Image (cartoon, coloured by chain):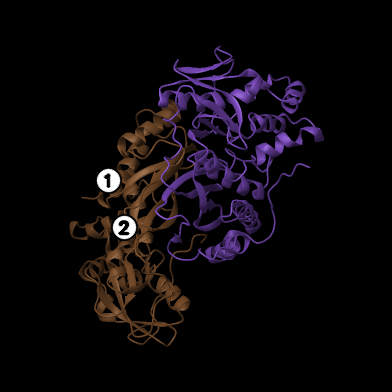
Chain colours: A purple, B brown
Amino acid sequence: MIHTGFPETGPSLGEVGEAGVIQAIVTAAPSTINGDDAAVLTPSTPNSRVVASTDMLVDGRHFSADYTTPYLVGRKAVVQNYADIEAMGARPLAALLAISAPPETPVAVVEELARGLGSMTQEWASELVGGDVTSGERLVISVTAIGSLGGNLDALRLNRARPGQRVVAHGHLGYSAAGLALLESGVRIPASLEPLVQAHQVPEITPGRGVVARSAGATAMTDNSDGLIRDLSTMARMSGVGIDLSSVAIKPDRLLEDAGLLLGIDPWEWVLTGGEDHALIGTCDGSAPVGFRSIGTVSRQQGVRIDGKEPAYTGGWESFA
Amino acid sequence: MIHTGFPETGPSLGEVGEAGVIQAIVTAAPSTINGDDAAVLTPSTPNSRVVASTDMLVDGRHFSADYTTPYLVGRKAVVQNYADIEAMGARPLAALLAISAPPETPVAVVEELARGLGSMTQEWASELVGGDVTSGERLVISVTAIGSLGGNLDALRLNRARPGQRVVAHGHLGYSAAGLALLESGVRIPASLEPLVQAHQVPEITPGRGVVARSAGATAMTDNSDGLIRDLSTMARMSGVGIDLSSVAIKPDRLLEDAGLLLGIDPWEWVLTGGEDHALIGTCDGSAPVGFRSIGTVSRQQGVRIDGKEPAYTGGWESFA
């Protein structure tokens, strides 16, 4: 079952006012920390470092009532920010939400959004702890994730891939792009392909995988937010290494093949250039950490290759295109 | 000298692309921490707690090319977020910037904004450590501040004002509202009143005052972002106390009086309802901490009064008005 659409009725933000909007958010995503000038978080690990990341989502650009719901937008906003925290090998502690919306927006939109944020932050054993609401011409959401990097192992950085390491991945590759293509095509989407649409609406990342990888010997990690080849090229360039992917390990699965046939699109394009999967891609010594699969190796020869050849597709997300 | 206006020429965001925009920001506000999936911050105090706050600013709503410059918007965005961190008694460590802007926006706008953010974060011995850039129909800026609460004293909370305490303030009251009124009036602004306009463009808060107040025995604190009476009413309600202000201590100074005469406005309205001064208002035992002045006392009788009477003005900022 695919859910789309934003509430269009009920009291508006302008009618309930700022205090009413904040009340709706706090009720939908309760927190014992929220409610002062700033949120105070006590890390559970002594001397832990703070990890922070932020993402801005604009209505019509990053999401649309045609393809998703406010609840799912809220859940996705958490995943994409927490994936950045996990990609450092850190544990997400809390999220902050800043939202601007036209005064005529139904409160139900913000309520659903906050419920989505609240439910996903809970799945990561964290909370929505603060934020800001204001009016604006468009619905714009900015979510900031705060994480904690315990212990004295280094963070998982883009510049720490080393020749001889294994390249590992957690999460689907290409699902989000395929799901968006299905939604945009206007075709009747067969039930068998709904997982692709759902992966576009809310990518599935298991909480704690980055933390596990760091303790299991990973050194570099990122999430494929802009496209697999593009993000791995950044890692390779910053590490001064090359990355050799195995075509067998990353080749489109049955769902992607079927969607490709239905839409007349080569599914490899989704795998190699589709962003927003927020899959964790890292490099490590030894075997792949639990939850990760091997997809290639790190070499001395700069660049990113598949079976030793140039990738067929190398594009990706461009913010100002 | 009053500076206003946004750059309107030069290469656009769409022309230089996402990588070019990020490069412009990083060059304008350099950081050794920036550039990975998330920023990692190492607090200087052992076992310190993390403090986080976020604010969203919308072009035409929170700022306008008629009244300010991108450089000043950047500086103000830092002050208003860091004031929230200081109001907890914590030290700001870093800021994150999320920005959405139309592709035709000159890169110079973002560059100036980043220079403003960079310069003000430096004045607080901190850095702009990360962010997100994306396209949108309007310029929208979201700044998140991360701070560190060292030691084991409690944070300065809204619910910790206690009867018998002194009410203290750091920073001007009413200047920002008076400055905005001058700008909006269209009158030729006399040089003597420029400090009011400058206080609206960038409120002046001395770094570290909240930290000092916390170690000097303050227990409750907030910043007057929405209006003095409104913000103190929140503190009084949450603490279950009353606040008695002294009219002599908060009365409009010569600049506010002059601006009031020029515009035909009672300057008390600016003092009591004008937000955006981001002055730190706290309660403490004993004498006022260095940098703070006494403006009243905490009593058992709920409500906020001036010389024992209802304030003449009690309104304030309303996000969805």
SS at circle 2: helix
Q: What residue type is labelled 1?
A: Ser
Residue A189 seen in the current view: no
Q: Earlier in the sequence, mark 2 or mark 1?
A: 1
Q: To which quarter of the image does residue B258 belong?
A: bottom left
Count of marks overlaid on the render: 2
Q: Position of residue B36 (x, y in %)?
A: 43, 36
Residue B211 seen in the current view: yes
Q: Position of residue A124 (x, y in %)?
A: 59, 51
Instruction: Please give the chain letter of the residue carrying mark 1.
Output: B
The reply, left or right, for residue B291 in relation to residue A168 is: left
Residue B200, which numbered label?
Answer: 2
The reply, left or right, for residue A49 in relation to residue A32 is: left
- Residue drawn where x is 54% and y is 27% of the image: A167
**In the foreground, A241 or A233:** A241
Q: Position of residue B28 (x, y in %)?
A: 31, 37
- Residue drawn where x is 38% and y is 85% of the image: B163
